[in-house]
Image (spheres, helix red, strand yellow):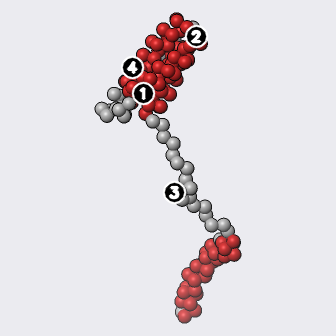
Amino acid sequence: MARGGALRSRAPLGLVLLLAGPVTGCGPSDTAQDTAAPPATSSPASAPEPRTTSPEDLCVRVVADWARRSLESGTYGDYQSMGLSNRQYEILREVLDAARAERKRRGARAVDESIGREARQRCADRYRAGAPSKGPWQ
């Protein structure tokens, strides 16, 4: 009986050694860890400054872009499908009216200049006192 008990007590130890052997043998050696380069870290001082676009500049960009697209296609959608606020959409319509009048007076070459000028002026007027405070649709 002593012999059967001894075999049973050694069996778990043998199983542990059998399973532990491959686990410890597969990892990197200590020398490989010592010579490896330290992981790269970024500090806040080395990170580039984030760029932001002012509400006025964003207005000019989207209004002028949609004005050019609308003049080329002869039509435009609703303000929500264009990603515009209600006021930006009003500015777009005003810019388009001015561009169409400019095209009649001075021809197609003057249209692009008119769009840029009108969008810049109207968006500047809109955002002169800061961003709207009543919600994104204002």
Mark 2: give few (<14), some (14-19) or many (20+) Cα within 10 Å. few
Q: Which mark is residue 90?
A: 4
Please name the amino acid that badge 4 sits on. Glu
Task: Please name the residue shown 36% across and 34% down the image.
Answer: 130
Cα separation, mark 4 vs mark 1, equals 14 Å
Of labels 4 and 3, earlier in sequence is 3
In-front residue for pair 51/25 = 51
Q: Secondary structure at mark 3?
A: loop
| Neighbourhood count class around disc 1 (C-alpha, 10 Å): few under 14, some 14–19, many 20 upward | some
Task: Please tell me which of labels 3 and 1 falls first in the chain.
Answer: 3
Residue 4, visible in the rendered structure:
no
Residue 102 x, y percent position in the rendering: 51, 10
Mark found first going from the N terminus, 3 or 2: 3
* Residue type at numbered disc 3: Pro
Residue depicted at 48% across the width and 37% down the height = 53
Earlier in the chain: of badge 4 and badge 1, it is 4
**Looking at the image, residue 52 lies above or below residue 48:** above
> Quadrant location of the C terminus?
top left
Q: Position of residue 22 (x, y in %)?
A: 65, 73
> Would you name the residue on which mark 3 appears?
44
- The residue closer to the viewer here, 60 or 35, is 60
Which three-letter amino acid code belongs to the residue tagged 1? Answer: Ala
Distance CA(mark 3)–CA(mark 1): 34 Å
In the structure shown, which secondary structural element does the residue marked by tag 2 occupy? loop
Q: Amino acid at mark 2?
A: Ala
Mark 1 or 2, which is nearer the eye?
Answer: 1
Disc nearer the start of the sequence (4/2): 4
Q: Which residue is mark 2?
A: 108
Give me the disc on residue 15. none
Distance Cα–Cα, label 4 vs label 2: 23 Å
